[in-house]
Image: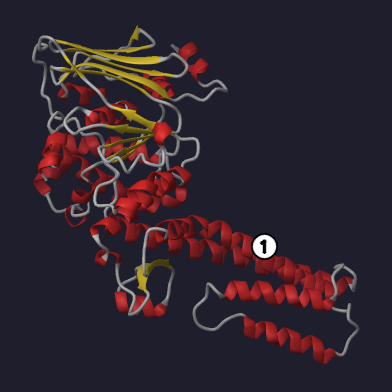
């Protein structure tokens, strides 16, 4: 098994190439061939598209116990390297095979070993990022994350907390650890509730509510300000030493630029910096600098070495700020493509904060009128914000990106371009979207796959609890 694991981490990247399912819900069979990049699976509701996504998501979590809640005879997933994972169900037994070799898994007694989990993920990918069709339901869960004591004291709740804690801590950078407890409990409550409502085969749910977005972006903005302040403090300390050394050394020709060129460069850098500030700007300091140089009446190059140090500091600060703020600006720009006569703003505008109250650093600025909260957006606009936030802030960057019914609540024009903007954030990642809207695949014709099933000639023997079969029918009724 170790040899197989090593081989799977070769230079050639892997992606899911085929999924075969027989006896699903005791009656359906299907084969789906996939490609790298975008896959748009088109078909009517009730055929098993949602279940297909849940199969991938649960396997990527290595949550084999979840398959006890699904009726099927055999599931096989193969990648482009001809490696495979197979699950076979017979009576009460569930057997798992990796590359046709049976694993140690025994339902209720022996889970997959860590080596087997690693090998499974080397075949189908790391943990998937999943955007479920019941996204609008999740927006209303945030206020009750910690409110149900009966739910939290159940043994399965603690088990979910341990698994999710390990998943997030093992896949996130240290700067996010302060929010981990909130994220863990929030995700566990979402998962637990959705399994109660939509069946036990629902995978782990990490999709954010609009409250999660507001808190997450605000925390991100505040961390960016702290990070920037620390770096600029170090810059100040270094600059003092550099300036002292330049004065003590008496060098005058450190810069090839003229004094006017240096001052113009400083002016441009300061003006660019001031665009992101509220209140007093640095331009006042620049004017004092020009006045001080002109009042000396000194030769043009006398202070060029000091001006060059100032230029270098401003350039380094600009690069640092761009690096820290780029993820925030990218989210802001992505959302604003979809908004009309209003703009998503991220920052600490005092007037906006006064209107919104609290510490929120994200708000909507209309063409006319006062800024307002993201809560006031339409259902389609909230879907755009939460989808793009989930896509860009997922702690799992290399697994499949799964989207169920991306068209829900979206304007028809938005349905055509949403996958394009998600793909831009996940270059090289396999994206699998299930839809019954022709608009979603209108601009991706080569990526559209028509989902078809066959009916078993005779029903398979009833096995286990089928907790996922009616979800798509439920969606039709809503």
When the figure is inspected, residue 265 is found, relative to residue 462, above or below; the finding is: below
Structure colour scheme: secondary structure
Residue at screen point 33% across, 54% down: 384
- Give the total of numbered labels: 1
Residue 347 coordinates in the image, percent (x, y): 44, 69
Q: Residue furthest bottom?
A: 295
Closer to the camera, 381 or 172? Answer: 381
- Mark 1, Cα crowd under 10 Å, few <14 / some 14-19 / many 20+, is some
Circle 1 sits in a helix, a strand or a loop, which is it?
Answer: helix
Residue at screen point 46% across, 35% down: 429
Point out the image quarter for the N terminus: top left
Closer to the camera, 82 or 306? Answer: 82
Residue at screen point 19% across, 27% down: 47
Q: Which residue is mark 1?
A: 316
Residue 343 coordinates in the image, percent (x, y): 39, 67
The answer to whether 410 appears left or right of 398 in the picture is left
The answer to whether 471 appears left or right of 240 in the picture is left
Residue 337 shows in this picture: yes
Residue 154 shows in this picture: no
Residue at screen point 68% across, 68% down: 314
Residue 306 coordinates in the image, percent (x, y): 80, 74
Please tell me in which quadrant of the rendered image residue 315 appears. bottom right
When the figure is inspected, residue 306 is found, relative to residue 6, above or below; the finding is: below
Q: Residue furthest top?
A: 101
When the figure is inspected, residue 268 is found, relative to residue 398, above or below; the finding is: below
Residue 249 coordinates in the image, percent (x, y): 89, 70
Closer to the camera, 395 or 257? Answer: 257
């Amino acid at each position: 098994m170790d040899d197989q694991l090593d081989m799977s981490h070769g230079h050639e990247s892997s992606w899911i190439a085929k999924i075969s399912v027989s006896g699903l819900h005791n009656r359906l069979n299907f084969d789906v061939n996939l490609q790298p990049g975008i896959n748009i699976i088109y078909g009517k509701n009730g055929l098993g598209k949602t279940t297909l996504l849940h199969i991938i998501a649960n396997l990527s979590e290595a949550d084999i116990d979840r398959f006890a809640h699904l009726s099927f005879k055999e599931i096989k997933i193969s990648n482009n390297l001809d490696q495979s994972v197979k699950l076979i169900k017979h009576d009460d037994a569930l057997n798992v095979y990796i590359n046709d070799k049976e694993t140690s898994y025994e339902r209720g007694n022996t889970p997959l070993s860590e080596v087997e989990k690693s090998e499974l993920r080397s075949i189908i990918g790391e943990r998937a990022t999943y955007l479920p069709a019941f996204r609008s339901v999740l927006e209303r869960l945030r206020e009750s994350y910690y409110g149900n004591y009966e739910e939290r004291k159940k043994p399965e709740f603690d088990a979910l907390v341990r698994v999710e804690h390990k998943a997030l801590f093992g896949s996130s950078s240290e700067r996010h650890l302060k929010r981990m407890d909130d994220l863990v409990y929030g995700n566990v409550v979402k998962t637990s509730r959705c399994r109660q409502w939509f069946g036990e085969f629902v995978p782990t749910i990490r999709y954010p509510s609009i409250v999660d977005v507001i808190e997450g972006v605000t925390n991100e903005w505040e961390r960016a300000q702290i990070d920037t302040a620390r770096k600029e403090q170090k810059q100040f300390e270094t600059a003092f030493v550099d300036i002292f050394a330049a004065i003590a050394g008496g060098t005058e020709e450190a810069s090839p630029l003229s004094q006017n060129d240096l001052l113009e460069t400083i002016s441009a850098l300061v003006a660019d910096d001031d665009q992101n500030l509220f209140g007093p700007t640095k331009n006042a300091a620049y004017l004092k600098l020009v006045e001080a140089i002109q009042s000396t009446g000194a030769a043009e190059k006398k202070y060029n070495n000091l001006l060059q140090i100032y230029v270098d500091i401003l350039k380094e600060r600009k690069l640092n700020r761009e690096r820290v703020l780029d993820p925030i600006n990218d989210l802001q720009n992505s959302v604003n493509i979809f908004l009309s006569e209003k703009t998503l703003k991220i920052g600490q505008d005092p007037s906006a904060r006064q209107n919104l109250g609290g510490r929120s650093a994200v708000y909507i600025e209309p063409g006319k009128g006062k800024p307002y909260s993201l809560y006031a957006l339409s259902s389609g606009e909230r879907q755009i914000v939460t989808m793009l936030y989930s896509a860009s802030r997922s702690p799992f960057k290399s697994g499949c990106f799964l989207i169920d019914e991306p068209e829900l609540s979206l304007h028809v024009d938005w349905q055509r371009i949403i996958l394009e903007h998600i793909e831009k954030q996940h270059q090289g990642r396999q994206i699998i979207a299930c839809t019954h809207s022709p608009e979603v695949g209108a601009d991706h014709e080569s990526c559209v796959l028509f989902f078809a099933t066959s009916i078993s000639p005779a029903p398979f023997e009833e096995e286990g609890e089928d907790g996922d079969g009616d979800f798509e029918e439920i969606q039709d009724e809503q």
